[in-house]
Every structure is written in structure tokens, then in C-alpha cells.
Image (tube, rainbow, N blue to C red):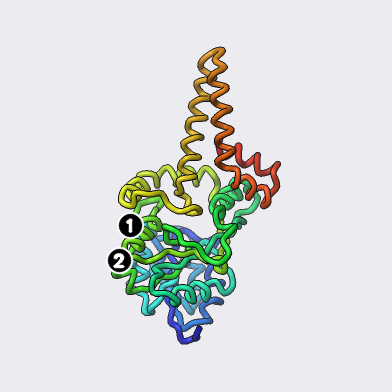
């Protein structure tokens, strides 16, 4: 790949004082492989993000006057970009060496590819948080057996590449409030235009995974958006997206288990409820068996079950 290839790095950020400096250092290092520009769109941060960005004189920094959400910010970045290829990087990511190069190499190889994204590492940069480790495991699960690449239904919005003209052609990013969901909706439109969304094994990143409570709140908020997207697509997302059929079934079983256990506590001497609870538990373990093995290999079985029970109950 020629160093004459032009790339615009777009980094949306909001209250990222703890992560933006390390993120930028890695992006700047990777950008040296291309004719590139680095565009930071600050979604009206209220912390010291702007002060930290000022340390870097080789970036273009814009601050939005009113907090408008990551979809809006990403659209602003694409309009400001001068180059043919856009590389989106979230401000809380640490991208691995040569990942950008590998993403772009895959994108330009085939006209049928709409977006190429990186695969997350299961480890979390959040210190001393078992629940964050669990979220990291969940997010990385499904990609451990990928040898080279895998076709997915969502665009890996945290870290991926796409042609600027193609993004404009399909209508850019849709805006969602709060927790987001843009990656699923954009992935759907990319597929609608007969293009593939890929994730590749030789492009990775680490991040500060949120804790379980924060993740749970985001998923509740996203549900209304997912329903709209799924109704148009008429199918669930692929494994590893966070919205697969397997995860939907797991959530449904957990709901039944909690409801069943609550009834058992309220109704005296009802052994049938207890039996049905354990039956549902067996189904849940069967459904999650591959994930249990994946987690065991990463952190060990004993510590994983502590996390698993914390997550479920």
C-alpha cells in the first residue's frame, strides 16, 4: 500500500479527559503511514478534554456548541474531512499497531465491501473492575474462532473505515439520543446498498469497558431503537454485535428465571416453581456453554462464575 493514500481520521469525543491523550498518541503514530489529517469533534465536553487536545498541534479540533450526540458529531467530521477514506476512532480506544493499515488494505481490495471494522480485545483498560472485565468478555465473544475476516450485520463504529463518498451516498449517520445504536442502523443501510460489513482479525483495539450497571442502562435505552431497526431488517444482528438472537434468547430466559424465582418466594410450598427455575437454569447454561468456556480460558472458571452470577442476578 502506497504512503500516498489519503485518510481522514475522525475522532468524536465527549468528556474524555482520562482517555483522549493516549488515544491521540496512538492515532498520530498510525497516521504517519498515510497522507492524513486528524479531525477531533468535541461534542461540547465539560471537563478538561479541550485543554488536553491543545497539547497536540498536528490535529484539527472543533467544538460543538451544544451536545448533540455521537451520530451528529460523526456526520460533522465526515463533512469536514478532505480525504477519500474515513477512519473513525472513538476517543476511549487504544488502537493496535498496523490496524489502520490492515483495515484500509481490506477496504480497497473489493468493491463489494462497504465498511471494515476492527475486533475488540476482551481485556479492559478499566482497572480493578470485574464487571468491566465481564462486559469486555461479552463484547469480544464470538470472534475467537475467526481466522481472517467475518461478515457482520453492524458497522463497527468505534473503529472502522469507510469511503467518504459511499457514506454520503447512503445518507450518512442517523442521530440517536443517549446510548446510541447508530452502528446497527448504518450497517443495515450498507447491506441495503448490496455492500458487506466486515470485521478483520488483524485489526484490534482495547478500551475502557463500562461496568455492568452502566451497560444494562444503555441496553435498556437502546431497546426501542433496536426494535425499529430489526423490524426493517426482519432479523437479528450477527454474533458479536451485542444484539444477536442468542443474546436475545439469553435475556428472555433470565427474565423468566427472575420472575419464576420471585413467584417461588411469594408462594409457599410450591416445588413446581423451584423445579421450573432449575430447568430454566439448565437451559441458560446450555445456551451460554460456549461463552462459559471462552470466559474460563480468559479468567478461570471460579472467578467467572462470580461475575456470571453478578451479571444475571
- For numbered disc 1, what is the local secondary structure? loop
Q: Which residue is mark 2?
A: 170
What percent of the width, then of the height, locates residue 233? 34, 52
Q: Which residue is mark 1?
A: 175
**CB under 8 Å between discs 1 and 2:** no
Visible residue check, residue 224? yes
In the image, taking residue 166 as reference, residue 40 lies left or right, namely right
Which residue is found at the position 62% from the left and 42% from the top? Answer: 307
In the image, taking residue 141 as reference, residue 63 lies left or right, namely left
Cα separation, mark 1 vs mark 2, equals 14 Å
**In this picture, is 143 found above or below 88?**
above
Q: Looking at the rendered structure, which numbered label has been put on residue 33? A: none
Q: How many marks?
A: 2
In the image, taking residue 145 as reference, residue 91 lies left or right, namely left
Visible residue check, residue 22? no
**In this picture, is 143 found above or below 131?**
below
Q: Nearer the viewer, residue 243 or 73?
A: 243
What percent of the width, then of the height, locates residue 252? 46, 36
In which quadrant is the C terminus drawn? Answer: top right
- For numbered disc 2, what is the local secondary structure? loop
Amino acid at each position: 500500500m502506497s504512503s500516498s493514500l489519503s485518510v481522514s481520521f475522525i475522532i468524536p469525543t465527549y468528556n474524555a479527559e482520562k482517555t483522549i491523550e493516549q488515544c491521540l498518541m496512538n492515532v498520530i503514530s498510525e497516521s504517519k503511514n498515510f497522507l492524513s489529517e486528524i479531525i477531533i469533534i468535541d461534542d461540547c465536553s465539560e471537563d478538561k478534554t479541550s485543554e488536553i487536545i491543545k497539547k497536540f498541534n498536528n490535529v484539527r479540533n472543533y467544538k460543538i456548541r451544544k451536545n448533540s450526540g455521537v451520530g451528529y458529531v460523526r456526520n460533522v467530521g465526515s463533512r469536514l474531512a478532505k480525504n477519500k477514506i474515513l477512519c473513525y476512532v472513538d476517543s476511549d480506544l487504544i488502537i493496535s499497531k498496523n490496524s489502520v493499515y490492515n483495515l484500509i488494505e481490506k477496504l480497497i481490495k473489493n468493491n463489494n465491501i462497504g465498511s471494515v471494522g476492527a475486533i475488540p480485545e476482551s481485556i479492559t483498560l478499566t482497572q480493578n473492575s470485574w464487571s468491566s472485565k465481564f462486559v469486555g468478555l461479552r463484547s469480544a465473544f464470538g470472534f475467537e474462532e475467526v481466522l481472517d475476516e467475518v461478515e457482520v450485520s453492524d458497522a463497527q463504529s468505534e473503529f472502522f473505515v469507510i469511503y467518504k463518498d459511499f457514506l454520503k451516498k447512503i445518507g450518512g449517520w442517523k442521530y440517536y439520543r443517549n446510548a446510541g445504536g447508530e452502528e446497527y442502523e448504518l450497517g443495515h443501510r450498507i447491506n441495503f446498498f448490496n455492500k458487506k460489513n466486515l470485521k478483520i482479525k488483524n485489526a484490534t483495539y482495547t478500551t475502557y469497558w463500562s461496568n455492568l450497571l452502566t451497560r444494562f442502562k444503555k441496553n435498556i435505552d437502546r431497546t426501542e431503537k433496536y426494535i425499529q431497526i430489526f423490524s426493517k431488517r426482519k432479523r437479528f444482528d450477527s454474533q458479536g454485535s451485542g444484539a444477536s438472537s442468542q443474546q436475545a434468547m439469553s435475556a428472555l430466559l433470565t427474565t423468566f428465571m427472575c420472575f419464576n424465582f420471585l413467584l417461588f418466594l411469594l408462594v409457599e410450598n410450591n416445588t413446581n416453581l423451584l423445579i421450573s427455575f432449575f430447568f430454566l437454569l439448565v437451559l441458560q447454561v446450555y445456551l451460554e456453554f460456549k461463552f462459559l468456556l471462552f470466559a474460563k480460558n480468559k479468567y478461570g472458571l471460579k472467578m467467572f462464575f462470580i461475575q456470571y452470577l453478578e451479571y444475571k442476578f
